[in-house]
Image (cartoon, rainbow, N blue to C red):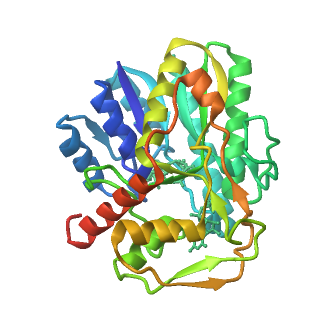
Amino acid sequence: MAILVTGGAGYIGSHTCVELLNNDYDIVVLDKLSNSKIDSVNRVKEITGKDFIFEQVDLLEKKKLEKIFTEQKIDAVVHFAGLKAVGESVEKPLVYYRNNVIGAIVLCEVMKNFGVKKLVASSSATVYGTAEQMPISEDTPLGVTNPYGRTKLMVEEILRDLYVSDNAWSIALLRYFNPAGAHESGLIGEDPNGIPTNLIPYITQVAIGKLKEVSIFGNDYPTKDGTGIRDYIHITDLAKGHLKALDKVIGSSGIEAYNLGTGKGYSVQEVIAAFEKASGKKIPYKMVNRRPGDIAVSYADPAKAKRELGWEAEKDFDEMCRDAWKWQRNKMNGFY
Ligand code: NAD
Ligand code: UDP
């Protein structure tokens, strides 16, 4: 049984490949390396001591995708490939719709033609838009506020239509909260291009001295210390969620959405304090205005994933900070 992992060289994909290989799945990894490096593929091989096929292919190149399905016996797909920067999606909506929406359509067309109907797909808590009720369960009304979020919601809807058209499909839509941290080995982790837009890679770059200070986007939210609260989930826990979802889609048919989060929220100030502890460094910060589009609080109700997939986050917040810091230090030492 081989699993095709699209976007498998990326942050979440590479950690999921480690878990798949450690659980004796054969994998074929496809990635065009637009937001990742071949090093992460090699690191996955190093961590697991296992080899696999890597294809540097753009999902939109249908003929090349068909060639992979012709040459490999693909039984199921875990689909990560996509663009994910909210700000960039506002500037380049067509690029996002083409890559994320058409990419998913091309993938499903090829899967359908080859009779492969088992799919685990990356969605995002961004599909809940400005949800006000916490925690967020899967039946919270959906609503998106930017093109990136819209691509995620569109793909969810396309996949639901696909299932209605043919009940043999089996699809899990995984709505991630805030993935963070790195593999415990410190060999793979998040590797953002340019200045990070997400809080945790920004903090680790301040801690290492690459950036001067963290800007806290708003301290007037109705939260315990006025700063935004999010549900940060260790990347290895998130990766393991994909294996549970894969078990589910392989063993049944249907389409279901699952929140992958911890159910706990941490404020920006708590995150900074935890990183000071993990790194032993002072992390300077300043308060600035709220970032447009941000909500005060977001954390998951992960009960459905526990009930139906048998999955729940196991690693704690401090471990996540330690692993993110280890990865950052290794990179700075010229390790990557
Ligand atoms: P990432 O950028 O690290 O990985 C995505 C990978 O997909 C990259 O390696 C990129 O080169 C590849 N890719 C993009 N378009 C492609 C295409 N057309 N053909 C082939 N390869 C392509 O991102 P990530 O953080 O690992 O995210 C994976 C998925 O999870 C994405 O769909 C993203 O939208 C979703 N997601 C991420 C987060 C997050 O905070 N990281 C949160 C929610 C959802
Ligand atoms: N944030 C911040 N400074 C930064 C980046 C993020 O204060 O440089 C805050 C942001 O307002 C939110 C939280 O940190 O409350 C997490 O933001 P991130 O961009 O990592 O994830 P999001 O939940 O927005 O997808």
Q: Please state if 148 lies on the left or on the right of 204 as rendered.
A: right
Reply above or below: 183 against 314.
below
Residue occupying image coordinates x 70% and y 66%: 224
- Residue 286 on image: x %, y %: 58, 86
Look at the image and tell me in which quarter the N terminus lies: top left
The quarter of the picture where residue 275 lies is bottom left
Q: Please state if 308 lies on the left or on the right of 276 as rendered.
A: right
- Residue 170 on image: x %, y %: 59, 20
Residue occupying image coordinates x 41% and y 60%: 321
Residue occupying image coordinates x 71% and y 28%: 160
Asked if residue 8 shows in the view, the reply is no
- Residue 276 on image: x %, y %: 42, 72
Residue occupying image coordinates x 32% and y 66%: 328
Q: Please state if 219 lies on the left or on the right of 200 as rendered.
A: right
Reply above or below: 14 against 290.
above
Look at the image and tell me in which quarter the C terminus lies: bottom left
The quarter of the picture where residue 291 lies is bottom right
What count of labels does the image hold? 0
- Residue 151 on image: x %, y %: 67, 49
Q: Please state if 58 lies on the left or on the right of 100 as rendered.
A: left
The quarter of the picture where residue 92 lies is bottom right
Asked if residue 182 shows in the view, the reply is yes
